[in-house]
Amino acid sequence: MPTHSFPELVAFLAIARRRSFRRAAVDLRVSPSALSHSLRQLEERLSLKLVNRTTRSVALTEAGQRLLDQLGPAFDGIDRAVEDLNRFRDAPHGTLRINAPRQAMRLGLGAVIAEFVLRHPGMRVEVAGSDQLDDVVADGFGAGVRHGQLIAEDMIATPVGPWLGYAAFATPGYLASRAAPRHPADLDDHASVAYRFPSGKPFRWRFRRGNETIEVEPPRTALTFDDMDLVLDATLAGVGVGYMFEAQARAHAEAGRLVELLPDWRPAPIRFFLYYPGRAHLSFGLRALIDFVREQNRWIDEPNSTPRAKSSV
């Protein structure tokens, strides 16, 4: 019989995979102090240091890395064995973790997932709202959501949620003393509110009219954020021109609080994609979500349409 505590090994595996006591504690639904205590007990039992922890980082020792390499496949096998029992159920059951950008959740994906859990009450979906390009496999997620161009080639992806278009906006007050641009080049005369990816890479503004496509750096940047909702807030405050999802600003434009600039230069709309590492060993819950998303996609016939989720009632 095993001489080591199973919960201690589970705690170590979560810490090793997430490289964070806080995130591992969230995954296991325990406190970081309880997780730290379990790791300390395991290290004392083994008389080996497994994890080096500083105030800013968590790193594995050589022994810790060796243990992770051995434990990972073994625990994955246990997960698959338990998951295989789902074939005896009439409906999916369990927990599914997804990493998705905050705006994807706000602009359609949140409604899709809500409808999914209403249809499958045995499923529990945990969404980590983040614009970071996380490694969904290494970070323990079942799937992720990203723009198509940001997904690695070795992943399988299916579109999810509505078509979304970008557009430039400003307040009537901001435009009162400035001429509205008629061409993207005219933006050089304006202040801007910019978005920057968490990696530090700036988000370029794209415009298209007919066969002509123009990409520009945000001009004369007054404020830069890593959250699109903050871009909207600053634009509404009259700081400058903001470039964002049209769906974010639609209600404000209809109410007269914002004015769309260069409406004839809207770029082609985009969609987010649900992506996952492969068809082998997909959990029953993830398979059910993929099937549900594909069902929703049949309601989206063309860009700018809105998915109509079938009622589960």
Image: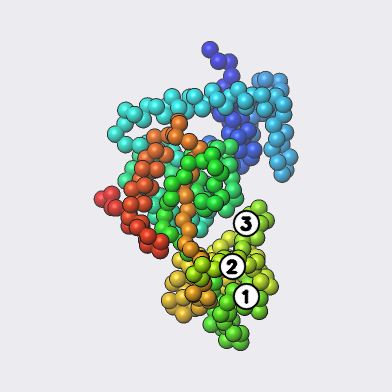
The answer to whether any part of residue 279 appears in the image is: yes
Residue at screen point 51% across, 67% down: 211
Q: Nearer the viewer, mark 3 or mark 2?
A: 2
What separation in Å lies between label 1 and label 2 (alpha carbons)?
9 Å
- What percent of the width, then of the height, locates residue 88? 32, 28
Residue at screen point 34% across, 29% down: 87
Residue receiving disc 2: 214
Residue at screen point 46% across, 66% down: 247
Q: Which element carries disc 3, helix, strand or loop? A: loop
- Callout 3, which amino acid? Phe
- What percent of the width, then of the height, locates residue 128? 52, 48
Give above or below for 216 relative to 129.
below
Residue receiving disc 1: 185
Q: Is residue 161 left or right of residue 243?
A: left
Q: Which of marks 1 and 2 is nearer the N terminus?
A: 1
Q: Which of marks 1 and 3 is nearer the N terminus?
A: 1
Give above or below for 104 relative to 1.
below
- What percent of the width, then of the height, locates residue 278? 48, 36
Q: Which element carries disc 1, helix, strand or loop? A: helix
Mark 3 nearby-residue class (10 Å; few <14, some 14–19, many ≥20) = some
- Callout 2, which amino acid? Ile
Instruction: Choose top left, top right, bottom left or bottom right for residue 19.
Output: top right
Q: Which element carries disc 2, helix, strand or loop? A: strand
Give above or below for 82 relative to 21.
above
Residue receiving disc 3: 197
Q: Which of marks 1 and 3 is in front?
A: 1
What separation in Å lies between label 3 and label 2 (alpha carbons)?
20 Å
- Callout 1, which amino acid? Ala
Q: Nearer the viewer, residue 53 or 84?
A: 84
User: For the image shown, how many numbered marks are present on the structure?
Assistant: 3
